[in-house]
Image (spheres, helix red, strand yellow):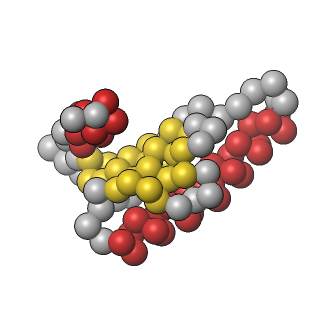
Amino acid sequence: MSEIDETLKRIKSHKGVEGIVIVNSEGIPIRSDFMNDDVKVKYAANITQLVAKARSVVRDLNPQNDLTFLRVRTKLHEILIAPDKEYILIVVQNTNFE
């Protein structure tokens, strides 16, 4: 098992994690464990746009700075976003787990 597979398995084992999507720099999902392709594509497209906007805001505030992590919390989910130069890691977690 590759290091990436082990890391994804470890993330997925946390309580409440519903899905993981890895998106390339063009916003195309390259890896996902979501069963529904529509959900995967929606997360990939929308989160890619959100990351671009958030990165722009961070750089406008300080050109020396860059976005390293973003957390979005809704009534149903918490979306954890780790952008990198080539990829974006998206983890969707249910906020109502026990």
Task: Name above or below for residue 1 compared with residue 50.
Answer: above
Above or below, 24 against 12 in this view is below
Q: Residue 28 at x, y = what percent? A: 53, 61
Residue 33: give x, y in percent of width and height.
28, 56
Using the image as rendered, state which of residue 6 and residue 53 is in the foreground.
Answer: 6
Residue 52 versus residue 15 in the image, above or below: below
Q: Is residue 92 visible?
A: no
- Residue 21 % position (x, y): 40, 53
Q: Which of these two is toward me, 44 or 70?
A: 44
Q: Residue at x 35, y 56 (%)?
A: 32
Which quarter of the rendered picture does the N terminus lie within? top left
Residue at 59 percent of width and 32 percent of height: 68
Q: Viewed as shown, does residue 25 lie left or right of 9?
A: right
Q: Is residue 88 above or below residue 36?
A: above
**Figure quadrant of residue 80:** top left
> Is residue 56 toward the left or the right of residue 42 in the image?
right
Q: Quadrant of the C terminus?
A: top left
